[in-house]
Image: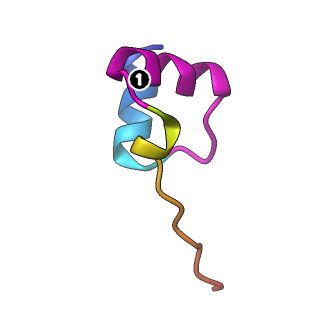
Amino acid sequence: LTLSNLSILKTGKAKAIRFSTLEAICKVLDCQPADILEYVEESEN
């Protein structure tokens, strides 16, 4: 997990996330994916 990856995730620019990245974040934060993820429906433009 790199600082640039964290920056992309923090700014909301990520289009996808690898399960290994999600697992690493959850392990460090001692949480479950649902604790840090939110589904936001994309607008139809």
SS type, badge 1: helix
| Residue at 55% across, 21% down | 23
The residue wearing badge 1 is: 4
Predominant secondary structure, magenta span: helix
- Residues packed near mark 1 inside 10 Å, few (<14), some (14 to 19) or many (20 plus): few
| Residue at 47% across, 48% down | 37
Spot occupied by residue 16 in the image (x, y as percentages of width and height): 63, 42
| Segment tinted magenta in the rendering | 14-31
The three-letter code of the residue at mark 1 reads Ser
Residue 14 lies, with reference to residue 22, above or below; the image says below
Q: How is the image coloured?
A: rainbow
Residue 20 lies, with reference to residue 40, above or below; the image says above
Residue closer to the observer: 44 or 20? 20
Q: Does residue 40 appear to the left or right of 20 in the view shown? A: left
Give the quadrant of residue 3: top left
Residue 11 lies, with reference to residue 29, above or below; the image says below
Q: Is residue 15 magenta?
A: yes
